[in-house]
Image (tube, helix red, strand yellow):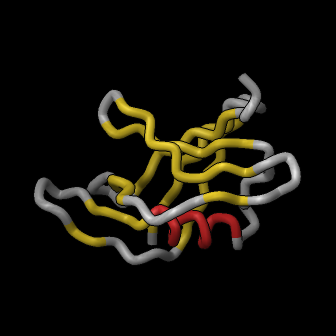
Amino acid sequence: MLTLLIEDRRHGTDELAEVRVPLKAADGGHFWADAKQVCAALQGGPSRIDGPAKVLTMRGKYRQTFLRISAEGEETNQSANLKVNADRTLPIIVESLDP
């Protein structure tokens, strides 16, 4: 079980979603999750993110965008390693696609 801590900056709201995805243990106590599997689990549940939006997580000082949702609802994502905290949480940020 992976807990997503969702900060939706479009609306100023916070939400929590629990999804079932495989986690791969890594050195240092954290885990890795595949972005494509996280997107499928999140978007297939009641906490799905409606667009337009881009969804990202932070890896250190770097922004890692792993999902884009167009105004028409088209989702774009691909496999990528998302670093999951040792407590099996993944903080994610939802932003508007508008500049």
Instruction: Work out which residue is located at the far top of the displayed protein and give it.
Output: 99
Instruction: Work out which residue is located at the far left of the displayed protein and give it.
Output: 27
Spot occupied by residue 45 in the image (x, y as percentages of width and height): 71, 70
What is the total number of numbered labels drawn onto the structure image? 0
Spot occupied by residue 34 in the image (x, y as percentages of width and height): 42, 67
Spot occupied by residue 23 in the image (x, y as percentages of width and height): 34, 72
Which residue lies at the image location 73% right of the left edge and 51% below the top edge?
69
Left or right: residue 37 versus residue 7 is left
Quadrant assignment for the N terminus: bottom left
| Snapshot quadrant of residue 25 | bottom left
Spot occupied by residue 41 in the image (x, y as percentages of width and height): 60, 72
Q: Nearer the viewer, residue 2 or 67?
A: 67
Which residue lies at the image location 72% right of the left edge and 29% below the top edge?
12
Quadrant assignment for the C terminus: top right
Which residue lies at the image location 58% right of the left edge and 64% below the top edge?
39
Instruction: Work out which residue is located at the far right of the displayed protein and give it.
Output: 72
| Snapshot quadrant of residue 94 | top right
Q: Nearer the viewer, residue 97 or 60?
A: 97
Left or right: residue 7 versus residue 32 is right
Which residue lies at the image location 71% right of the left edge and 59% below the top edge?
75
Left or right: residue 19 versus residue 60 is right
